[in-house]
Image (spheres, grey):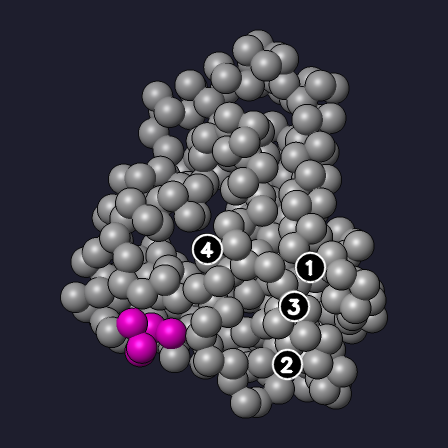
Amino acid sequence: MSTPEFWRAVEAVHSPVYFDSDVTQRLTDLGLRGFWMSYFASRAAALGTPGPELVTATFHGFAPDRVARALPEAWALASREDVLAARLDGARAALTPAVDDLDLTSVNGHLTEIVRRATLAGRPLAAAHAALPAPDDPVGRLWHFATVLREYHGDAHVAVLTASGIDGATANALAVAAGLVPADQQEARGWDDRAWDDAYEQLHMRGWVDESRQITPDGTSARARIEETTHRVANSGIGDREATARAISATPTLVTIARAIEASGAIPYPNPTAVPQP
């Protein structure tokens, strides 16, 4: 079974595209308007040129109004192909300093095979990214396959949350209460005060926060169970012996890269993804 460190490291390898200003600049140079339009278009482009309903459903944690301000307008401003190319080029540039001295042949071989063996049923974002052409260069391949696996874990997380009756606002409010994300998560995810108050009411009804919106022991346990179940669901799709062995073998190199990315300042912790440091 793949360890939490594996999934957290995969997240870190993928995530500079959200925090590196150069990536956003590449996307705005295409004609996209600001960070959020660049974010939604670049992450969703693997799905085609989707509208806000599909993106709201697959991304889960964002207020529908925030998504609708970016899509479908983005597709009139920049082509899907150019958006995908700019995102990949930005990822290469962001990752190169962290991997410059590493031979990526082995870790890329492991990630390639894990993705090849993965069950994609019920994993829409992972399947969409897996269908994109894999780059030929080592850094591009590293980011591509880490991205497929990152979205694979994310698809599992959405499945766990929805099965638990936890909507996007409530999931974010729980992450704030647990101290896993910055305090401005409400604004970052676009939820208005009414939705945010409703989210905390849901948490209070479950006994996960108290009247002052502080997390309770039951809330801490619930958030830990969500994380553990997410790992288990993600692992279930790559659970054969060879894939598991490859994930274990790849983890030390991935963690080394993840820590180099963090040391470079490319990813802050905590951050809005709610994924801890590897």
The residue labelled by disc 2 is 97
Q: CA distance from mark 4 to mark 1?
A: 16 Å
Mark 3 or mark 2: which comes first in sequence? 2
Q: CA distance from mark 3 to mark 2?
A: 30 Å
Mark 2 or mark 1: which comes first in sequence? 2
Q: CA distance from mark 2 to mark 1?
A: 30 Å
Mark 4 or mark 1: which comes first in sequence? 4
Q: Amino acid at mark 4?
A: Pro
Q: Which quadrant holds residue 97? A: bottom right
Residue stretch in magenta? 80-84
**Residue, x 83% and y 70% (percent of image)?**
249
Mark 4 or mark 3: which comes first in sequence? 3
- Residue 148 image offset from top left, x and y in percent: 55, 65
Q: Amino acid at mark 2?
A: Pro
- Say whether residue 1 is left or right of residue 207: right
Q: Secondary structure at mark 4?
A: helix
Q: Main secondary structure of the magenta part?
A: helix
Dividing the image into 4 quarters, which one contains the N terminus?
Answer: bottom right
Q: In the image, is residue 166 above or below residue 29?
A: above
Q: Are marks 1 and 3 in contact (CB under 8 Å)?
A: yes
Nearest-to-viewer mark from 3 and 2: 3
Residue 109 visible to an observer of this rendering: yes
Q: Are marks 4 and 1 in contact (CB under 8 Å)?
A: no
